[in-house]
Image (cartoon, grey):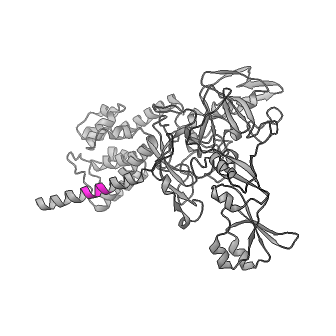
Amino acid sequence: MDGTQWIIFILIIQVIHFLGTWKLYVKAGRKAWEAAIPIYNGVVLMKIINRPWWWVPLLFIPIINLLMFPVVWVETIRSFGKNKLLDTWAVILTLGFYIYYINYAEDVSYIENRSLKPRTGLGEWVSSIVFAIVAATFVHTYFIQPYVIPTGSLERTLRIGDFLFVSKFHYGARVPMTTLAAPMVHDTLPVVRKRSYLADVNPETYKTSWINKLQLPYMRLPGFNTVKKNDIVVFSLPSDTLYQFFRAEKAVKKPIDKKSNYVKRCVGTPGDSLAVIDGFVHVNGTKLQLSDRAKVMYFYTIYSKKGVSTRALEAVDAADYTRKYFANSLSEAQANGLSPYIRGAYKNPQGQIEIITDEKGIPTEVIRQLRLSLSEERPLSRLANMTDEMVTQLRSNQEIDSVVRTNEPKGKYGGSFPQKPNLYPWNNDNFGPIYLPEAGSTVEINHRTIPLYKKIIRDYENNDVKVTGQKVFINGQEANSYTFKQDYYWMMGDNRDSSEDSRSWGYVPANHIVGKPVFLWMSFDNFKDDFFNWRPRWERIFTTVGGSGEPVSYRWYFVAVVLGLFVLDFVNKRRKRKSE
């Protein structure tokens, strides 16, 4: 639905409101025409139902208005003496059209000084819950949104199990485009695991579906920052085909604001020329200088004539390496007991059973409980994922002979964007150069460049694109150039060899930007394990995401403030009792 269509829709709603309420306005001592003037009729209605004027803007805010309309319907009928539970359900289940019946068929009287206090404890409880949800939805949608890091693409900068507050107002809050959705959730309803919004996501029908016509055009409130290189950004995944997050069923076309949220580092901004050379990002011909808080990780091969021990890797907190154990025998009960910890097991030619695990290995208490007799391999070389600090520390170990970063050679295709190996044989370590479009800029379009920009022109800027031989047609016209309508960014994970990012699916449009992580309020290790295995990372709790230098935890300041408030409340209550 574009801007004009949305205005027409609002005017239709105003007509519906006028036809269903004008007699009630008259009975409340107002003029009939006052029910027909947009916005003004809302202010008058608030006076009639004895509610504050600031309820009116809430009726025009997407998602929040879905909560407010039923409240206003109920308040309207109660202002004319309809207080029974049956009346309340009637007006809600008929989507407000029960007011038509009252307006034309019932002889009701206006209650001018109606008591606003709920008549029952349940009513008061419901009223409090509704407005708590309204307030929380407003904050969640336009100011601050909680977010949890589900994947390791930013390890060790942001870690799996980090709980963040994401600022919507830094870059300007994006107004919800999906108008029919549950508040306070993203794309999935908890517990029932069903979609939280109404939309046609079928690729074959989503363009013509009537329900998708109710979506708002892209709008963003003014912000006080723009996305800059080195910013960590939360955005809607452009190539999202997940029915729900981490649940791929079939291809879907989700609304922009209901696409899965990802978090990466912005390494390229509109107008830049970007390349990845031997694993390092270069922007406009210069190697990108990352923030000092960026803990970039790469895979390294570690060599040692004495064998690379697990203890050496544990000492530097390396990640993503495997461990191999040997057992002479393994009973069925022992194998079942090991199943949660192993990636695979097989018998080698020597008759031994080789057991493969991740870096966590098999816990000592499990080995003891299952009465296992195991020995661990100490191979001459091992592959591990490490930061620069880990590598420096490991190289200082006298047992280690060398540590060499892995690198895919230039010209070897690795499945990277735009997935055209004959024209662009790129991989994650050697990629580009590629131009990042900015709004208003124009590029040459031909059979060689169209793979880079086809998705932008077709999916993000809603044009028809066809390639016939070496000719490119946009909306049926042969095209030699294209002018972009919005800005585009390049997002990458700090965990460079274990990150699905722009190198895989390309550009991130400006209308997909969600917000900026600003504060880390909780963090748990073992987050993907059972809840009872979660362990707080105390040094990360109550730290800022941005800034420079080592993050400082403010948790004790928070504890002090909370305790201070409790003490102040206790003192005030004690003084009050004494004064009585």
* x then y, percent, for residue 164: 50, 49
| Above or below: residue 58 compared with residue 521 | above
Q: Main secondary structure of the magenta part?
A: helix
Q: Nearer the viewer, residue 117 or 379?
A: 379
Q: Quadrant of residue 350?
A: bottom right
39, above or below 163, in the image: above
Q: Residue furthest left?
A: 580
In the picture as drawn, the residue positioned furthest to the right comes out as 349
Q: Nearer the viewer, residue 282 or 256?
A: 282
Task: Name the quarter where the C terminus is drawn.
Answer: bottom left
- Dividing the picture into quadrants, the one containing residue 416 is top right
Image location (x, y in percent) of residue 281: 67, 35
Q: Is 65 or 518 nearer to us in this picture? A: 518
Q: Residue at x 57, y 65 (%)?
A: 530
- Give yes or no for residue 427 being in the magenta stretch: no
Q: Which residues are magenta?
A: 563-568
Instruction: Name the image quarter holding residue 253.
Output: top right
What percent of the width, then of the height, locates residue 248?
67, 52
* 202 w.r.t. 129: above or below: above
| Residue 212: image location, x then y, percent | 57, 40
Image check: 486 left or right of 432?
left
Task: Please indicate, yes or no, whether residue 84 appears anywhere in the rendered image.
Answer: no
The residue lying toward the viewer, choosing from 375 and 163, is 375
Determine whether 490 is above or below 354 in the image.
above
- Name the quarter where the N terminus is drawn: top right
Can you see residue 506?
A: yes
